[in-house]
Amino acid sequence: MQPIASEIGRVMQCVCDQIPPAYPCEGDKVVFIGIEMNGKLPGPVDHFCKDLNPTRTKGVAFYVLNSTGKTDGLEGIIAAMKANGVETYGKPLGIAVKGGLFKKGQPTDEDIKKALAWADEISKM
């Protein structure tokens, strides 16, 4: 997760933080949220997203890392954010990261380039 988040932060010249963040979102145009998940949204991300409102951010864009690249499991939180007046920008990006039995997978340079291109498109919305 960190290599992609760091590059998006560097290229977009924005703050890169963990969830829950060290500072509150206030008046942000878009919040990029990277998640490692396989069908179930992690609790801290769920709570953070449910607390978002238009004063804090206009919209959110999700990217998901897992072994399959599927983004299943975001439907509920997207609906909850929409009910709070927060839009979801673009289609969530899924990135398949292969790991081993005892080793966590890392995104490749191609994965990072793909995420940067996706973030650039989102920033133009």
Image (cartoon, rainbow, N blue to C red):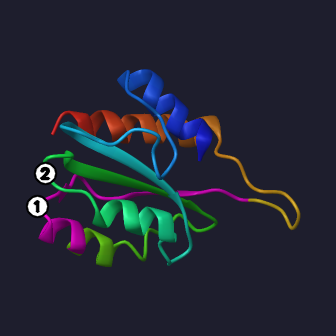
The one of 57 and 98 positioned closer to us in this rendering = 57
* Residue kind at label 1, given as amino acid type: Gly
Quarter location, residue 37? bottom right
Under circle 2, the secondary element is loop
- In x, y percent, where is residue 86? 16, 57
Q: Are marks 2 and 1 in contact (CB under 8 Å)?
A: yes
What residue would you read off at disc 1? Answer: 85
Between disc 2 and disc 1, whose residue precedes? 2
Q: Nearer the viewer, residue 66 or 22?
A: 22
Label 2 and label 1: CA atoms lie apart by 6 Å
Residue 89 located left or right of residue 18: left
Q: Which mark is residue 51?
A: none
Q: Farthest residue to the right: give it.
A: 102
Name the spot of residue 117 as percent of width and height, x first.
38, 35
Q: Is residue 100 left or right of residue 25?
A: right
Which residue is at a point 42% across and 34% down the rendered structure image? Answer: 116
Residue 54 image label: 2
